[in-house]
Image (cartoon, rainbow, N blue to C red):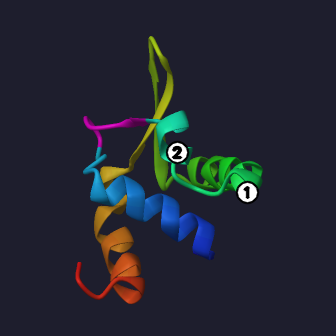
Amino acid sequence: MLIDSIKIDILYKLWRNRCFGKGHMLIDNVLRGFPRNKIKEFKKAIDELINDGILGVKKTKYGEAVFINPKMRIKIRNLLKKYYDFL
């Protein structure tokens, strides 16, 4: 699993907000707070995470929302621990 810093930032934001399975976050809200000149890269990274099965998609009446795949929770936690010691 090849993960770059953009994907780590996305996963950490979803982890921090407890977006697993039932909890989810709209894609627009995931992108909020990141640099505006790199939004296309972040959208591409979200699409790659969805295609890899790390993130799941849920359709809501407000748009598409994403969440961390609960089956990948332990792997993602171990990956995030390498970058964030306090987890």
User: How many other residues sit within 10 Å of disc 2, few (<14), some (14-19) or many (≥20)?
Assistant: few
| 77 is higher (above) or lower (below) than 31 | below
**Nearer the N terminus, badge 2 or badge 1?**
2
- In the image, the segment drawn in magenta is 21-25
Of 11 and 21, nearer the camera is 11
Q: Amino acid at mark 2?
A: Arg
Question: Residue 50, percent across and down?
Answer: 57, 47
Q: Which residue is mark 1?
A: 38
Per the image, label 1 sits on a secondary structure element best described as: helix
Residue on which disc 2 sits: 32
Q: Residue at point 38% right, 53% down? A: 14
Q: Is label 2 in a helix, a strand or a loop?
A: loop
How far, Cα to Cα, is label 2 from label 1?
A: 11 Å
Residues at marks 2 and 1 touching, judged by CB atoms closer than 8 Å: no
Of the 4 image quadrants, the one containing the C terminus is bottom left
Corner quadrant of residue 5: bottom right
Say which mark, if any, is on residue 4.
none
> Horizontally, is 18 left or right of 60 in the view?
left
Tell me the chief SS of the magenta region.
loop
x%, y% of residue 66? 46, 39
Residue at 63% over, 75% down:
4
Residue 36 within the segment the image draws in magenta: no
Q: Position of residue 47 (x, y in %)?
A: 66, 47
Amino acid carrying mark 1 in the image: Lys
